[in-house]
Image: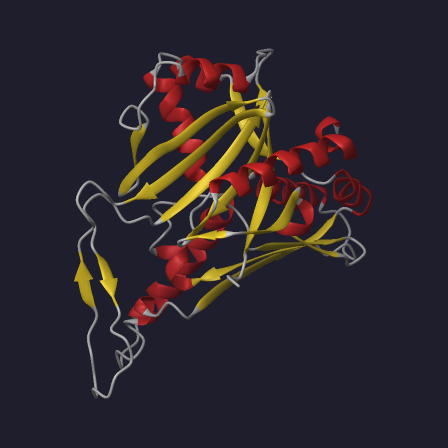
Amino acid sequence: MIKEKSRTLFYRRVVWLNGASGSLQKHLSKAHDTLVTTHDRTFPHRDGEIQGLTVEKRNSGLFVHLAYYTPHQATSLVPSPSKAKSKDTSPEPPPNKHEYLEGDIFFLVAGNHLVLCPSGTRESVALSYIKHVLRKTGKEKLLTRFNIEPVAKIDKVKLLQQEGVKKVSLNASLYEATMEYAERKTTKMNLLHGVAEEVLALFAEDRNKELQKIGEMENLSVKLEISFDSRKKGGTLGRERLEKTASMLIADDEDKGFTIVTGNGKRLTADEIRISDKVKLAPHGNSVFRSNTCEALEQYLSDLKESGMLEQ
């Protein structure tokens, strides 16, 4: 029996700005009326491309399956175990008229509600695709009128409001905080990048030159802890800044490696604060079956509606 794959489903909400209103589902559905081929739905993203493999109008909303890949990028084949003392990997170019999948993501948009299932890639792929689609179909001005934001669980929000924020802890690999910073300028990365740069500058001054190549080591981590000491008088501005930092981390959908400690010492991670759920899905190569994933997203959206989460 083939083992099912665990995937996380995320909920995001479209927030209209400055008095604007509308339905993202309607805008995207109309936009896709003119993007009828996969060629029409292919856009650049970072070093590769996003391709809209499937766009399907369903009773539950607009369902989209996206693939991310690097054009003409070969993959490395690993030889089967043998009696040879050593072997090397061998590059294998993609078959004719195909590319090797680096990751894909599924999403369902219903009105202004968005549920996503990343599979080997980040949510930014879906957000980038939505922006490209609206730009290509003449709706670029629309991009300034809404944000797509994570939604925090109401009980966790109330807990933070009641107890306040005592501490915010951030962590990442030293490699991630420096080398990946150019691609992922999130709230967490902005804060950690400065710390990482100081660490690397300090190591670069090592006279014995043993630490000068420390930045090449991916297994080193950098951590930042920002705390508020309530025992000291004053500090109202400091508390407000700490709570603002916590709010920015929650609102940034790319930020995950953080922990918020409340005034009474309760620890909340990103997964505990944001609305999400885990499911088991049938594997399809190194991804999951599209039909199963669509059903899971529809059920998740239905569960959120029934629980009242969509109205909070």
The part of the image, by quadrant, that contains residue 167 is bottom right
Residue at the image position 28 percent from the left and 75 percent from the top: 80
Residue at the image position 33 percent from the left and 34 percent from the top: 51
Q: Is residue 134 above or below residue 200?
A: above
Q: Would residue 253 be seen by someone viewing this image from the given angle? A: no
Q: Quadrant of the C terminus?
A: top right
The part of the image, by quadrant, that contains residue 124 is top left
Q: Is residue 284 above or below residue 311?
A: below
Frontmost residue, 72 versus 209: 72
Q: Would residue 63 be seen by someone viewing this image from the given angle? A: yes
Marker count (numbered): 0
Left or right: residue 47 versus residue 105 is: left
Rendering coords of residue 273 (x, y %): 68, 46
Q: Residue furthest front?
A: 1
Rendering coords of residue 66 (x, y %): 40, 36
Frontmost residue, 58 versus 165: 58
Left or right: residue 67 versus residue 268 is: left
Picture colour scheme: secondary structure
Rendering coords of residue 29 (x, y %): 47, 17
Rendering coords of residue 309 (x, y %): 73, 33
Q: Is residue 230 above or below residue 201?
A: above
